[in-house]
Image (tube, helix red, strand yellow):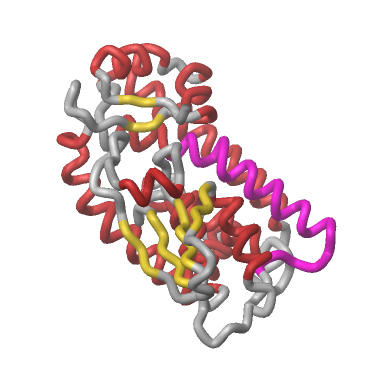
Amino acid sequence: MSSATPDKLHLFDHPVSSYAQKVRIALREKGLEFTKETPASFGGQENAAFTAANPRKEVPALVVTPSDPNKAPFGVFDSTVILMYLEDAYPEQKSLLPRDPRLRAEARMIEEVCDTHYEANNWAIAEIKWFRRAEGAEAEALLEKAEKLTAQFQAWLAEKLGDKPFFAGDEFTYADIAAAAVVNRSVVNGYGPEKGSPLQKWHERVSAIPSVQETFAEMVAAAKVFSATAGNLFKPHSGSRREYRDHRLEWMIKNGGLNIVEQGLKDDNIRFSWP
């Protein structure tokens, strides 16, 4: 795409979402201008443009308005699909994926683990610490499991990183973008990599990259507000619902939080994905 008038990119997101952070870092790394908007409510969004872009009512969702007036706007949802769209649509901009096929496969596997198992673990910690879905001994037991799982994910990432500055070598690329937000959430949660370890030094390096630095600053600012008001967001029968999608639901069932799911169904403050 080399038209004088570029396509307009509008991102529906939430600054705390690891998936949305991944997309914002990618957009900034590719030097693409975009506007962003956080849907007003959770789980019951009535924003027609957002729902049209993603029937799942999940962030992120990217709305592309082509520069050609004869072409209609369209939506792209799922953070991985959005990143692949950006690679396909803007090949003249910085490529996020390394050239080597093995490194590309490594990047996609790292993204898969971070987007599913690691994200679900971080999400479960928020369910307990922010939204108080468990308290007392139950909360302590769940957080203990989450801490052990965090260590396992970080050990796996550390093995993939090895002694390289970044996952693909000397350059900040796709795998680093995929891992940045989830590892940073662990740091914010107090479960960060051991100080002085290769993964902790990697986190320092990526945090200093302008695209990441800006995105993390947005996350920290929003998290302060979000955590302070979290207790009022998902009250029983309030109309606001947290999404218990695939890997998140698995985390709860596998780690002893099934009663949290059952209570959330009774209170009508959890939801599942479309349809």
Residue 248 rendering spot, x and y as whole percentages:
48, 29
Residue 10 in view in this figure: yes
Does residue 269 appear to the left or right of 122 in the view shown? left
Q: Magenta part of the protein: which range? A: 96-122
* 117 falls in the magenta region: yes
Q: Quadrant location of the N terminus? A: bottom right
Q: Quadrant of residue 155?
A: top right
Q: Quadrant of residue 38?
A: bottom left
Residue 239 rendering spot, x and y as whole percentages:
21, 29
* Residue drawn at the location 78% of the way across and 52% of the way down: 105
Does residue 131 appear to the left or right of 175 in the view shown? left
Comparing 47 with 213, the one in front is 47
* Residue drawn at the location 66% of the way across and 49% of the way down: 110
Comparing 187 with 85, the one in front is 85
* Residue drawn at the location 41% of the way across and 37% of the way down: 123
* 27 falls in the magenta region: no
